[in-house]
Amino acid sequence: MVEHAETTENTFDVVVIGAGPVGENVAGGAVKGGLTVAIVESELVGGECSYWACMPTKALLRDAAALRAVRALPGAAAAVTGGLDTAAVLARRDAFASHWHDDGQVAWLESAGITLLRGVGRISAARTVQVTDPGGNTTVLRARHAVVVATGSSARLPEIPGLAGAAPWTSREAAAAQAVPGRLAIIGGGVVGTEMATAYAALGSRVTMIAREGLLPMVEPFASDLVAGTLKARGVTLHLRTEPEVVRRDENGTVHVTLADGTTLDADEVLVATGRKPNTDDLGLERLGLIPGDWLHVDDSLRVDQLPPVVDGDGTPAENGWLYAAGDVNHRALLTHQGKYQARILGDAIAARAHGTPLDAEPWGRHAATADDHAVPQVIFTDPEIAAVGHTAASAVAAGLRIRVVEHDLGAVAGASLHADGYTGRASMIVDEDRKVIVGFTVAGPDVAELLHPATIAVAAEVPIDRLWHAVPAYPTISEIWLRLLETYGRDT
């Protein structure tokens, strides 16, 4: 029972619920626009990316990638006398997760003039957020201009009999584990599943993957095939096009997974990586006539555009135009960098509206998140890496575009053969034949992540194919793949 709970009230121009990288960027942009901002966080300032996703997971993967690169060069390989130091890998991971302390992030908020409230924030009325701190005290925040939901997403557990009781790992436990399990079963073949299979296999786990829809079904088939081949070569067992029917952890701690095809697997831990759900269950959305647990639909300026005409069910007319949602929670593009892109746009848009400045909300305007629909980049840190932006061939066809797909062997490029002996990879570009611009690019191979931004610029800027011929790649670099793709496409098509 909480005693002596108190309620206070404060007013700000903007109230942000969620202090992950998206919320921080919204708040920072609004402050730069001359507004006062309060930000509410129930966990760690810095959010999922800082402590349980981008940073710690890539730290887990980096040592193994560096070791593979060394072993692909005979002279350097001669200097390698052992395998990975698991304790050192985990210690470096801990450092990149700031040892799960958010002092540095809090200090940044303070330096930016952003007020932090720790606790659970719930929308209690139009422009009003009630914050309940761990001691049961409440603070009512009034927003003059905007309330922004930036609460992100969390792992979704499928309804498999016995799974919830088997104490499964989600991406959080996989990113923060303090020991490497001898046997790891992974349910799901998407980005989290394949990256963690890559990491834990390198750290010594015997990894088994169960992927109902295959590995990385949203990327180009050649890229997922390369990753599947490497995982198998690293000793990972793949069970594709099947799914778990029952999961059980016995009294000794062993997890038993029975598949639809009758196969039974044993593991020390089971990681569930089957998708995400929005963190909107406990936001008070029902007070606005919205459905708790749903994604929040927004327009291109990130304003929630689904508010019904009444609030609290009492017939009071709704004040529309004050509620925004950025990052994973709006389901436009579940990637940290894309959420931060939205946040920068949103901070500017809120400040512009507050000052009565007309919005530049046309496609590719300052206040429109147009890239969410046309130019989303992503790197998957598997072995090999996959870097992609814009459409795949399948999504372009589904969008009704008339396209030509051009592919080239990445290993045949001089820079790649210099980079590593036996370099294997492939690249593709998707050309919109009606406009003669690139609408998609995918490359798979060792250390290709840094090739992605030129492709992102080409897609976002809609650079004509004819002009790309004048962007000369330096020789001998892996970037020469651009010239080879253009040559394959031809100059007179």
Image (tube, grey):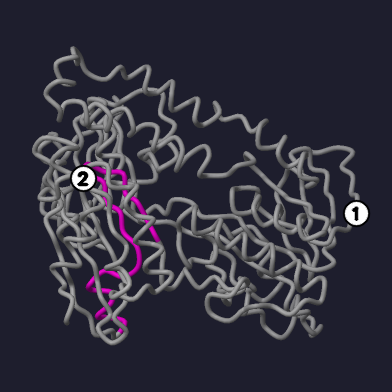
Q: Assign a secondary structure to mark 2.
A: loop
Looking at the picture, how far across and down is residue 454, in whole percent?
36, 58
Q: In which quarter of the image is the N terminus?
A: top right
Q: What kind of element bears circle 1? A: strand
- The residues tagged by marks 2 and 1 sit, at their Cα atoms, a distance apart of 63 Å
Which residue is label 1 attached to? Answer: 9
Q: In this view, does 28 lie to the left or right of 231?
A: right
Decide which of 358, 48 is in the foreground and name it.
358
Tell me, for residue 26, which label it has, or none: none
- For the C terminus, give its image quadrant: bottom left
Pick the front one: 381 or 312 = 381
**27 left or right of 9 in image:** left
Q: Which residue is drawn at 27% across and 42% down?
A: 447
- Verify whether residue 66 appears in magenta: no
- Above or below: residue 371 compared with residue 402: above
The residue lying toward the viewer, choosing from 296 and 487, is: 487
Name the residue beneath numbered marker 2. 476
Q: Which portion, as a residue range, is magenta?
A: 377-399
Whether the magenta-drawn stretch holds residue 398 is answered as yes
**Amino acid type of the residue tagged 2 in the rendering:** Pro
Question: Could you tell me which residue is drawn at 25 percent across and 39 percent down?
Answer: 197
Neighbours of disc 1 within 10 Å: few (<14), some (14-19), many (20+)? few
User: Is residue 243 visible in the rendered structure shown here?
Assistant: no
Q: In this view, does 261 lie to the left or right of 482?
A: left
User: Does 173 appear above or below 366?
Assistant: above
Q: Where is residue 284 in the image (x, y as percent from the top left)?
A: 69, 63
Residue 392 vs residue 245, the one in the foreground? 392
Residue 332 point in image, percent of width and height: 48, 68
Residue 94 shows in this picture = yes
As shown in the figure, which amino acid type bears the numbered disc 1? Answer: Glu
Total number of numbered discs in the rendering: 2
Report whether 258 appears left or right of 193.
left
